[in-house]
Image: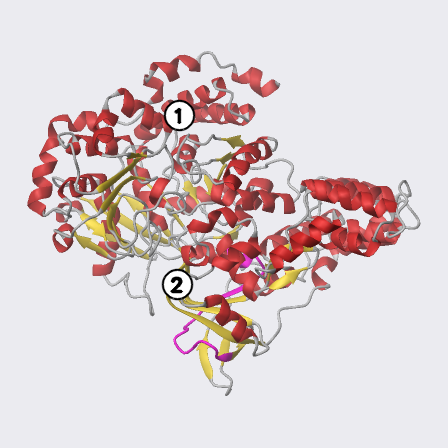
Amino acid sequence: MKTAYLAHIDERAKNNLPPLVLNAEQTKSVVEHLISGDDDGFYLDLLTHRVPPGVDEAAYVKAGFLNSVAKGEQKCQAIDKKQATFLLGTMMGGYNIAPLIELLDNDITAQVACEALSNTLLIYEAYQSIFEKSKNNKFAKKVLNNWADAKWFTDKEALPKIIKLTVFRVEGEVNTDDLSPATEAWSRPDIPLHAQSMLVKKMDNPLATIEKLKEKGLPLAFVGDVVGTGSSRKSAINSVLWHMGNDIDFVPNKRGGGVVLGGNIAPIFFNTAEDSGALPIECDVTKLNMGDEISIYPYEGKITNSKGDIVSTFKLTPTTMADEVRAGGRIPLIIGRGLTDKTRFDLDLPVSDVFLRPIDIGSNHAGYTLAQKIVGKACGVDGIRPGTYCEPRMTTVGSQDTTGAMTRDELKELACLGFSADLVMQSFCHTAAYPKPVDLELQHSLPDFMQSRGGVALKPGDGVIHSWLNRMLLPDTVGTGGDSHTRFPIGISFPAGSGLVAFGASIGVLPLDMPESVLVRFSGTMQEGITLRDLVNAIPYVAIQQGLLTVEKENKKNIFSGRILEIEGLETLKIEQAFELTDASAERSANGCTIKLDKAPIAEYLQSNIALLSSMIEMDYEDKKTIARRIQAMQKWLDTPELLSADNNAEYAAVIDINLDDIKEPILACPNDPDDVKTLSDVANTKIDEVFIGSCMTNIGHFRAAAQLLKDESELPTELWVAPPTRMDQAQLKKEGVYKTFDAITKHTEIPGCSLCMGNQARVASNTTVVSTSTRNFPNRLGDNADVYLSSAEVAAISAKLGHIPTIKEYLSAMQAIKPAEFEIYQYLNFDQISEYKDVIGHIALDTILEE
């Protein structure tokens, strides 16, 4: 093994990379060499520093070996009993916990085991075993006392009063595609390798610049005008911290710490930075330039330059930030603080004053918004005021494939062997069409990982995560997902990076500082030719007119950023339609979104979804118990349907009124910014090279409409791409003959999934101009140097056949083809009315499944 591993080290070193972590097979080989006494120093170093912690397969091998050495069952010249116990204590949780508890009874290892457990937070059910043991074991008693005293926290260094740094400045908006390019999504679990792609399409020689700045001898601060917009991928902060963070003891190939300064930091990115132990600060960065040496005074809220002049001020938020950094991140702080609080409660001690506690906002006489009521329900109270820290229960959690491997690794670090969230779903929509070898391996291994913990795993080709996850939702509940477009049309979701998604799935709650809300209130009547995508774009359009949103990045205004977007006035929408509006709240950088709907469309949707979920059980999707439990919950709501609603005296950060009578022509997002919206008249006659109709922003009606508009064409002046959101949509469209239209005019009928939307699979040609129905149009996302307009499927289809964006006259004329069949075109999939699905419902014995 040594020869092979040294060759691997050399190969990775050529690219300035550390070796990969050891897998289970390699760890077994390391153990065998240690037992035989062969080159002890080399193999002991590998066992100590190159095995992932938690419940990784390699960690299982490591823990088993160290346990046998510590108990004296296995002789090893290189490791004695105490050292074996110490090494067990570095593994964070999972397979090492039971051995450490047993080693509290051994005179030789008891003290070391005590120290190890005192600094271990991922205890879970083993807490009770230690509590019981403490009644007659002094070392177990000492563990409890150390937890009660928060020794795990107080032994760490506090956030410094002064932090000296060198500025690494990126101008304009830095989105997560810049930090973690979709084209390199396959490498995200390999943090050091993936970090080499950071900013390569954003600026010249970014990595060389970083290394040059490090020669000044100070750590670097990542600085930008607008930082972290776009996708929820934790790989973005992982890349930043690999270059600017600190190594984590006994956790290979991952770093924490670091400082991020932004005039505006997108909420999901802010949260992933918090969770990683970084210090994110929103402040004026206009006086911070590349290479500046600065001093941050976190407790005083000021930043000075090398001359001592104040160049920016800020307020450290949340109030617990100093503790989060000290604990190594928000997640370890929450888990550790909870462990300390529980121990003190069980020992009849007062609440610890060691921690900075979330501030109690107190009560006022205002009512609650819909979002505040839904989150309140998940917390067991009437409502949650903005600014209040809370931990709502997670009812539904989603994971997709380009972040799923990272979520898997985070779950391993959290020592998760079973999900506490009621339903966790894994999709394979981002890699299904053009899988690389690493994608194929993930598609093979990840379903078993998720299902073994009670999760539901979809299959490649099933379709887009959101189109499926929405089918599993319950009204007035809270969830999260490892994709920024996890934006429930029923209830509310708070999308997150893979670390927080793993936390929500494993622990069953999500840490949340309740955001303020912005109310968007529609009135009037939709005008001829106007679609829901136009209403999506009307929201930023009107916000810009009211001075609540700016396109310019320097000193950018965005009333939606970090807040919850709440929508009213469209109560009769079908759920598929409602999702277009909630989905697009991601492009507003909103923290979440709600939409007020009537009971009737929700009941119709749930009836349909019961049929779909029943068919999944029939088709042997796992985990059957989880699916059956969700079916029962849906039926329970249908038996007594009730919906929360906002109070009339609820308070909002802003109210935006949009009169549908005033929206008389389509509205498009222009290259390359989803905030830069203009009317069709402003962009008409722009030459178009390629058109994409697909993504989670589409439903079956869009494809029928596109086919109706294109049915008389035999050849197009553009390259057309078509990708339905789910296999069910595809099957129905083929059954109806819609695909005959597409097959006649394009070779790009993609399998159900994300297709062009993320840019990690197929891509449009470089330097093209594109009309797309996808979610966002950041630079280089769909193709290198492509200019991308975001529009409705109807505008996209007409652009495809004309070769340019239509004029108003051309658009309205073409739309006449829709009118005769409008009702049939915009019908949605009701599975309970489709024989192949509805016939399954009565055949599924839910109680029997749940009893097995």
Q: Position of residue 506 (x, y in %)?
A: 59, 41
579 vs 191, nearest the viewer: 191
- Residue 622 vertical placement versus 224 (above, below): above
Measured Cα–Cα span from mark 2 to mark 1: 43 Å
Color encoding of the figure: secondary structure
Q: Which residues are magenta?
A: 272-293
Q: Residue furthest bottom?
A: 307
Residue 232 in view:
no
The residue located at (41%, 73%) in the rendering is 285
Within-10-Å neighbours for mark 2: few <14, some 14–19, many 20+: some
Q: Amino acid at mark 1?
A: Asn
**Circle 2 residue:** 202
Q: Position of residue 156 (x, y in %)?
A: 70, 64
Q: Earlier in the sequence, mark 2 or mark 1?
A: 2
Q: Decide: marks 2, 1 in contact (CB < 8 A)?
A: no
655 vs 303, nearest the viewer: 303
Q: Quadrant of residue 850?
A: top right
**Circle 1 residue:** 609
